[in-house]
Amino acid sequence: MAPKQTFSNSITKMLRFLDRPDDRNHLNEIVTTPVFTEPARQAAAKLASSSKPGFSQYGLIAGISNDGSPKVDDMLHFNVSVPSSTFICGSQGSGKSHTLSCLLENCLIRSDANELPRPLTGIVFHYDSFISDGGGSPCEAAFLSTHPGTSVRVLCAPTNVAVIRKTYSELPNVKIEELRLNETDLNTQRMMDLMAVKEGGSMPLYVHVIHRILRDLRGEQQATGSSFRYASFKDKIGLEPLTPAQRGPLTQRMETLESFLVKEQLSPSRGSANKTKFASKPLKKAAGNDWNPTPGQLTIVDLSCPCVTAETACSLFNICLSLFLEQKPDVGRVVALDEAHKYMNESAEAGVLTQQLLSTIRLQRHLGARIFISTQEPTISPKLLDLCSVTIVHRFTSPDWLLALQRHLAGVSIVRRLREKTAADADDATEQLADRVKTLSIEDSDSAAAMLAHIVRLRVGEALLFAPSAVLSIDSSSSVRKLNHDVLKIRVRKRVTEDGGKSIMAG
């Protein structure tokens, strides 16, 4: 064969790698969007085939705000099938927790508001410093238990279990457990995280000692094939010549950790001394909480307790998150942070939790995870805003919050004077479909002031949606119109379960 013909055959073979028939109708791109409209769903169903189905699991999350009664074309769905991340912010009472609960309902409960043949499993982190011996406020997500199709369990601090039982006593189908970690739940990385030190600050001597001991133990584990043992760690710490000033904070951290460990694993039985001649079988060994994923189950880690600081809560949330995610991904997973501003502060422990969340978001497709973060303050972690695929902004009045959004959201930073497109303005068939979905109109010469004005005027339950990859419409030639850097004004749907966030009014 001539060299020229051989080269031609080689190029032809290479071209086959560029021919992707599955992408000709954009279906792969469409079904991986986190948010889509009802017209887009119907169009995707027509493009789908037996080998390439359309949207298989989704739930109604909101209606696009228009004058008059709701229409089918105004329906906005959340794509449950695809791992994604959602950031929800707004002032107190603006509807954040309601929106979070609606998202959880879509993922965990089969109802008239969704299409959910395979329910997911979820975990919610909650911490409230406003709690006393008389009780406190339950996590609003716990009201999902009012639906018979789901189960809710609450893991709480052992020092506050009686108050937590009282707090959640009026809700049906809620199981209360003490948060108990197995010794095997600990490893070198988690111990490093527990001893977190804020970046840029001076590292206490005891932290250097801990890192050295953990490195030595890690080497022994690698050599013997064993796992981390807290007792060995504690014995080595006891042999270190630390001063009382150095040992004090270390002892405090270790005592806090031990209060959440299974006591029987810390104090093993000493052989036959505990046995009697009447014992016919060994006692069941105490164990920590079960982290195996169960479809339709919501686990709430509520560490509201006067004895638990926000920093300690972050450390324990970090361990619970890794335990939740390391299970086999046979079931889709949801991770939610409720009222994150109450514990995501400037501490080293909060920084470690933030890094874990950022890693989870980056690996969400491989972990099969959906992440929801609800907070009053969008300034808690700008990096989270950068990575989230959907941002829902409820009403607020702070110019500083708008500044934070401008720095990290394309729909705010590139906001410009927009007019509602009409067929007369359209250049092609795709833009003609803009009549169905009206993006937010910014008519003020000062776009930032106009955006803040829109946000301030939002009513309870209304929000602005920023989701560049959201699919708004699909035309007959499979051209896809996305939200890109535009903005949608939405009104979040009603709850399927009871609403636990209603304000308590005087009189």
Image (cartoon, helix red, strand yellow):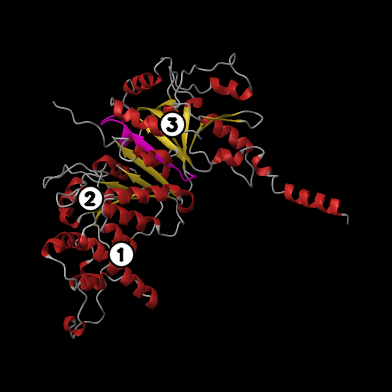
The residue most toward the right is 1
Question: As shown in the figure, which amino acid type bears the numbered disc 1?
Answer: Leu
Q: Which disc number belongs to residue 240?
A: none
Question: As shown in the figure, which amino acid type bears the numbered disc 3?
Answer: Phe
Please, what secondary structure does the residue beneath circle 1 have?
Answer: loop
Q: Which disc number belongs to residue 311?
A: 2
Q: Quadrant of residue 55?
A: top right
**Label 2 near label 1: C-beta < 8 Å?**
no
Residue 296 as seen in the image, left or right of residue 162: right
Identify the image quadrant of the N terminus. Answer: bottom right
* Residue identified by numbered label 1: 186
Question: As shown in the figure, which amino acid type bears the numbered disc 2?
Answer: Glu
Magenta segment: does it hold 307? no
Q: Position of residue 468 (x, y in %)?
A: 49, 33
Q: Residue at x 60, y 18 (%)?
A: 426
* Residue identified by numbered label 3: 466
- In magenta, the rendered stretch is 81-97
Please, what secondary structure does the residue beneath circle 3 have?
Answer: strand
